[in-house]
Image: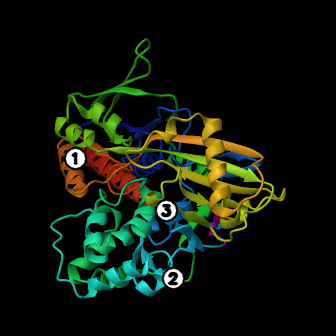
Amino acid sequence: MPAPGQRVAVIGGGIAGLTAALAVSRAAPAGTHLTVLEASSELGGKLHTSDFAGLPVEEGAEAFLVRRPEALTLARDVGLGSDLVGPATLAAWVWSRGRLRPLPPRTVLGVPTDVRTLDGVVSPRGRARALADLLLPRTQLGTDVAVGRYVAARLGPEIVDRLVDPLLGGVYAGRAADLSMAVAVPDLMRAVRRDRSLLRAARAAHRPPQNGPVFQTVAGGLARLVAAVAEASSAEVRTNAVVRELRRTPSGWRLVVGSAAAPEVVLVDGVVLAVPAAPAARLLAPDVPRAAAELAAVDYASVAVVTLAYPSAAPVAGSGLLVPAVEGRLVKAVTFASAKWPHLAADSGLHILRCSIGRHGETADLQRDDPELARAAAEEVASLTGQRGWPVATRVTRWGGGLPQYAVGHLDRVARIRAAAALQPRLAVAGAAYDGIGIPACIASGERAGQQVAAALSAAQSA
């Protein structure tokens, strides 16, 4: 029987890892020592808030979906319930066929529920092609299918190019032609199995907001959520702690932490591995090669966020705009941050915009240096919105290999990874590489992994 005072290491201090640490702290046997090891200098991963033009502006993710309860529940649980804020507006635009047009309402990640809302965004011929969905025979799905392939078969390629691809590109930085429907739009996948018509299935899958905002964030920035979860976990937190090696021992796991010149050996009874797929594959390769091979096949997209501050608002109202890849522009999305979020409406009168750049497989634009990339983004903002003047402040944040790409069959891959990890003592995996890229999905994966390790510790102690 293991001695009291078992030790658990959570490798990775993003929101998934911190949520896993919180779950372990609440469910593991009394006296369990918990350590979070984060390779970078700060916790949070892509939940990173910093001062920009005197305001707390996100450098990564800016909000979470409310209809999935995990983020909302966690924020309330750690004392931030009264600090949650919703957007002031959700009205948005899409640049299509030469100008800005209102983003059609009531879509499921771009899949329309009513072709009458598509006027201007797609051509009359494109709308007529979409209506053919109501007459076409059922399209075979198999266990999974690429979103773009299925939507194009039902509604035509123009719907994919002008709506589905830019919306998926904004969320995943991926291409609709490559992304798994089972992961990217699971509600729609379930609906189309019941109805041969995609338009009817989209209506069934569409869930309007219930007496509240679709998205929320934390006033003052999502870094506050990161700090609150870390504190609630009571874990020992170590930053700049690179885990170079993870190996099985007769009683648990051996970690090598730090530089090659000054390695530190840490012995633990359980591990939650909450890092991206590539470092997870490297760490698991010696003892869990099947999981490592599967993780090594998960591809990632690199992106950049260019933040701009202007002394006057853009002449376009709303929360922001999307730009389809077929338009051939640098910027794929612009968020009018100070118009969208009330807590970013500066007393100074400055207006904050965030530009997203980068799609899977496209890295040439990201090779530009920061001043050049900021200048190019500002030029595109002027072209897209009519924004006058030059930004008084700019910031470029790069997320190299930041967003996992969910290829067709991804859920089966994840099942194989977890099955291989489950054969090891007190080991679990978590993060965006598995069940979804959004904050609620990452929180759910962290909770699941932390509870698994805590339950295994309890079972080992009582054996």
Q: How is the image coloured?
A: rainbow
Local SS, label 3: helix
Q: Earlier in the sequence, mark 2 or mark 1?
A: 2
Q: Amino acid at mark 2?
A: Gln
Q: Is residue 49 left or right of residue 440?
A: right
Disc 1: CA contacts within 10 A as few (<14), some (14-19) or many (>=20): many
Residue under numbered circle 2: 210
Region of the chain picked out in magenta, as a range? 83-88
Q: Name the spot of residue 227 as percent of width and height, x first.
A: 59, 47
Residue under numbered circle 3: 71
Q: Amino acid at mark 1?
A: Ile
Report the quarter where the N terminus lies: top left
Outermost top residue: 261
> Looking at the image, which residue is at 38% across and 72% down?
159
Is residue 354 shown above or below 205? above
The CA distance from mark 1 to mark 3 is: 25 Å
Q: Is residue 115 left or right of residue 219?
A: left
Residue under numbered circle 1: 417
